[in-house]
Amino acid sequence: MSTVNTPSAANSTSPASSPSPGASAPRGPGRLTSLGPVGLVLAGGISVQFGGALAVTLMPRAGALGVVTLRLVAAAVVLLIVCRPRLRGHSCADWGTVIVFGITMGAMNGLFYEAVDRIPLGPAVTLEVLGPLTLSVLASRRALNALWAGLALAGVFLLGGGGFGDLDPVGVAFALGAGAMWAAYIVFSARTGRRFPQADGLALAMAVAALLFLPLGIAEAGTRLLNPTTIALGSAVALLSSVLPYTLELLALRRLPASTFAILMSLEPAIAATAGFLVLGQSLHPAEAAAIALVIAASIGAVRTQMGRGKAALPAEGQ
C-alpha cells in the first residue's frame, strides 16, 4: 500500500494534487509506475480477488478472523522488512493519518471476511463495491462521472441477480460495512501516500492493522494459526490480497483522482466472478456476463474521461 502540510479539503479527495513545497516527491518503483495509474489499479484488483478466492479455501482451517490475522501479520512483516520505514521526523498529523489508515484497513478486511464466511464471494464483492461507487459520486464534480458511476451501479446490481433477499442479512450487513471502510480506505490511502515516501506509510498502517487484529485472531483460531500449512496459505493470501494490491493502489492514488479510482473499483465484482470460476469452480451465467460488460464499459468511460481531462496536466506535474 515525507512530511507535508495537511492537505486542503479539496485535496483530500484528489490524490493527483501535488504535495506542498518542501515535501520530498514520492517515488514508486520504476517498473511498477511505468504501468500507469490505471494499469496499477487493474493489476491490484486481479491480485486481491484471486487472493480472496484463496482465502475462502483457507477459512475452514482458521476461521474468518484467523485468516484476516494471518493476512495482516504476514503482510506487515513483509512490508516492514522491505520498506524499513523511518519512525522519526513525522508530525502528529502524519501519525494520525497512518493510524486511521491502519484502523480502516483492518476494519475493511475483517468485515469483508466475516461477509464471505456467510455469503458467496461474488455477492459479497458486489455489495462491498457500493462504497467506492458512492464515493465516486460524492467526490466527483462532473456530471459525466456520475453517469459512469450509475452505469457501473446497474452492472453491480445485475451481477447480484437483481436483489439480495435470499442472502444472510448479517453477511449482507458485513459486506456493506466493508464497502464503507473501502471508501474510507481510498481517501486515507491517498493521504498517507502524500505524507510518507514510497510505501512507508502503508507498511506502518499494515502494522497498526495487524496489531489490532492479532488478539481477535488468537481468540478465534488459537493454535491453528501455528499450523505450517495454514501459515503458508495465509502468507500467500497476504501477498496476493494485501502487499501487492495495496502497494499498487497507493502508487496509483498519487496520480489518479479518488473519483476515477473509485469507479475503477467497480471492476472488482467482475474480477471476483472470474476468480471464483477459476479457483472455486463457480460458473458464470448470461446475466452475470452482461453485468460484467456494463461494469467494464463504465470503467472504460471513466478512464477516458479522466485521460481527456488530465492529458495536459500530467506533463506539468512531471508524471
Image (cartoon, rainbow, N blue to C red):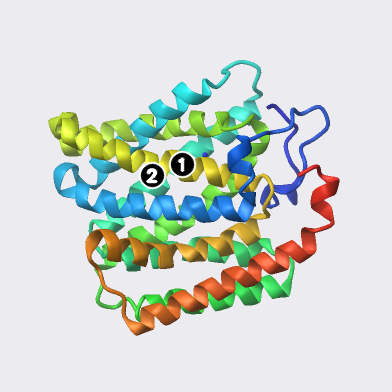
Q: Position of residue 82 (x, y in %)?
A: 48, 24
List the residue tagged with mark 2: 240
Q: Position of residue 29 (x, y in %)?
A: 60, 34
Element assignment for label 2: helix
Element assignment for label 1: helix
Packing grade of label 1 (10 A; few <14, some 14-19, many >=20) is many
In the image, 73 versus 244, the foreground residue is 244
Calculate the distance from the C-alpha at mark 1 to the C-alpha at mark 2: 6 Å
In the displayed structure, does residue 103 sit left or right of residue 262?
left
Residue found 48% across the figure and 37% down from its top: 102
Which amino acid, by three-letter code, is at mark 1?
A: Leu
Are dots 1 and 2 in contact, CB under 8 Å? yes
Residue 156, image quadrant: bottom left
Residue 166: tell me if it is visible: yes
Vertical relation: 30 (above or below) 125:
above
In the displayed structure, does residue 309 sit left or right of residue 174?
right
Which amino acid, by three-letter code, is at mark 2?
A: Leu
What label does residue 244 carry, if any?
Answer: 1
Residue found 64% across the figure and 64% down from its top: 138
Q: Position of residue 278 (x, y in %)?
A: 29, 62
Number of numbered markers: 2
